């Protein structure tokens, strides 16, 4: 082996060890870089208004649109929190949202987060504070979740997520809970 190669190895090996150590150490900075939260102020305001954990709203947004305000799903859900237009129309009739519209919910961060947070709060109320049920209802609809419960297909607990009949909803709830727990470990609050 040539001296030049030996010298290069002696320099590169410590650098590689440092990089690997950084990857395996629970570094807050690296975690926040890998799991960033955008639109913190808008999330904080809506979460406070509807008495929700802002980290939960952030986790839902991460899974729904990955913070893309004008996202549109193949099924037609719109905006940063991916609300179906019919659901957005229903939400707008339930409370005083001023001049907010369905179109704004599909394009504007504030409108999308406001309507989405209100809906999460409403589902949380309907399902008596159960987070797994709330998240499943956000994805599949509250009627479908009630049907699963009534038929005994799922008991609504986090321990039995594998019993959720819709694979998409099962995966959705698992992903939101994963990001929610990640955010709780990385961020004390927003």
Image: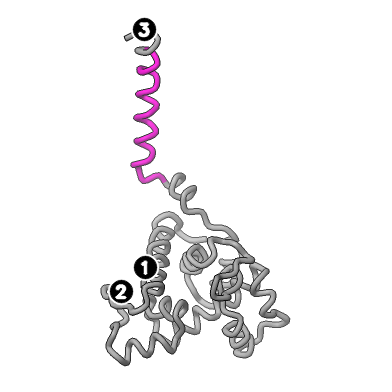
Instruction: Give the camera-side residue of 91 and 45.
Output: 91
Q: Which residue is mark 2?
A: 161
Quadrant where the N terminus is found in the figure? top left
**Residue 41: x %, y % from top left:** 61, 63
SS for callout 3: helix
In the rendered structure, find residue 174 and report the number of the disc placed on it.
1
In the rendered structure, find residue 153 and report the number of the disc placed on it.
none
In terms of sequence position, does the residue under pointer 1 or pointer 2 come before the other?
2
**Residue 183: x %, y % from top left:** 43, 59
As drawn, is 101 to the left or to the right of 22?
right
Instruction: Give the camera-side residue of 101 and 52.
Output: 101
Instruction: Give the camera-side residue of 131 and 41.
Output: 131
* CA–CA distance in space, label 1 to label 2: 8 Å
Is mark 1 in CB contact (under 8 Å) with mark 2? yes
In terms of sequence position, does the residue under pointer 3 or pointer 2 come before the other?
3
Instruction: Give the camera-side residue of 90 and 96.
Output: 90
Residue 20 counted in the magenta span: yes
SS for callout 2: helix
Is mark 1 in CB contact (under 8 Å) with mark 3? no
Q: Main secondary structure of the magenta part?
A: helix
Residue 6 appearing in the image: yes
- Magenta range is 7-27
Residue 89 counted in the magenta span: no
- The relative height of residue 66 versus residue 170 in the rendered view (above or below) is above
- Label 1 neighbour load within 10 Å: few <14, some 14-19, many 20+: some
Residue 49 appearing in the image: no
Q: Which residue is mark 3?
A: 3
Residue drawn at the location 53% of the way across and 81% of the way down: 119
- Label 3 neighbour load within 10 Å: few <14, some 14-19, many 20+: few
């Amino acid at each position: 082996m040539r001296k030049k190669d030996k010298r290069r190895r002696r320099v590169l090996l410590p650098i590689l060890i440092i990089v690997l150590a950084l990857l395996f150490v629970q570094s807050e900075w690296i975690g926040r870089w890998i799991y960033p939260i955008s639109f913190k102020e808008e999330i904080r305001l809506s979460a406070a208004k509807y008495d929700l954990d802002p980290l939960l709203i952030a986790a839902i947004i991460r899974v729904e649109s990955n913070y893309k305000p004008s996202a549109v799903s193949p099924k037609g859900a719109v905006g940063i929190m991916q609300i179906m237009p019919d659901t957005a129309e229903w939400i707008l009739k339930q409370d005083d949202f001023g001049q907010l519209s369905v179109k704004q919910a599909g394009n504007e961060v504030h409108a999308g987060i406001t309507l989405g947070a209100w809906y999460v709060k409403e589902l949380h109320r309907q399902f008596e504070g159960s987070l797994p049920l709330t998240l499943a209802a956000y994805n599949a609809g509250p009627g479908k979740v009630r049907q699963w419960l009534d038929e005994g297909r799922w008991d609504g607990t986090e321990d039995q997520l594998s019993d959720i009949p819709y694979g998409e909803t099962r995966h959705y709830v698992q992903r939101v809970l994963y990001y929610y727990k990640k955010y709780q470990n990385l961020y004390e609050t927003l």
